[in-house]
Image (cartoon, rainbow, N blue to C red):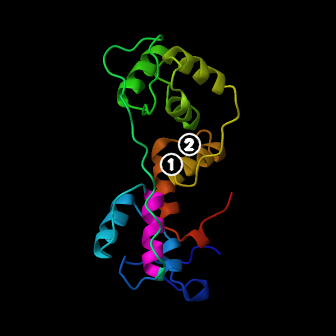
Amino acid sequence: MRYSGADSGHYGQVSTRPILVPDLSEAEFRRWYWLRAELADFARVLAISPGGGKQELTERIAAQLSGRPLPAPAKRRRTGEQLQGELTTATVIPAGQRSSQQLRAFFCSAIGPGFRFDGEMRAFIENGAGRTLGDAIDHWHASRRLEPGEISSQFELNRFTRQWHADHPAGERHELAAAWREYRSLPTDARPTA
């Protein structure tokens, strides 16, 4: 279905983004893109926990809207000691280490300004207890030769950005931003498919 502005969509659903109200149906709620801050505010209106990640919060709200029992809260991993002080390639990664700003700065200085925490590097840091930051640098270089992995559905902007750059290799940042605003304003059943 192509986007049809303010007129009705199929199955009695509307093509304009609804207001988050307690009598919204789960199906209509799931048709639209919501910012995490909007979801947290709506959770407070529904008198449910506004905590957790966007995906967890979405599932909690959807259950509340449909009258289903709320899902059990996700188990939070306890983080241990985090790296502090001067980091070197011989620094050992402790259990529970996060992909912190301190690590980002270290990797940018060691690898260069092109360094980004992607799924490969986040997983290496998360599961790399006992390995060194030098091992992490080697892993980063080795993972650049791999085909990009699939981006989890919770990172919708990242997925959109990757596909947009593939479709518009000479595109500019402002064009990407405009395309993203247009894309996220559409209900999921009216968005163009890849």
Observer-nearest residue: 72 or 19? 72
What element does badge 2 sit on?
A: loop
Q: Are marks 1 and 2 in contact (CB under 8 Å)?
A: yes
Residue 128 located left or right of residue 91: right
Residue 160 located left or right of residue 43: right
Residue at position x 53%, y 19% in the image: 131
* Quarter containing the C terminus: bottom right
Instruction: Please provide the residue range marked out in magenta.
Output: 54-65
- Of label 1 and label 2, which has the lower sequence position? 2
Does 19 sit above or below residue 74?
A: below
Observer-nearest residue: 192 or 35? 35
Secondary structure mostly seen in the magenta stretch: helix
Badge 2 is on which residue? 171
* Residue 69 picture location, percent across and down: 46, 76
Residue at position x 66%, y 40% in the image: 149
Residue 157 located left or right of residue 2: left
State the mark number for residue 176.
1
Q: Amino acid at mark 2?
A: Gly
Whole-angstrom CA distance, mark 1 to mark 2, is 7 Å
Q: Amino acid at mark 1?
A: Leu
State the mark number for residue 73.
none
* Residue 66 picture location, percent across and down: 48, 81
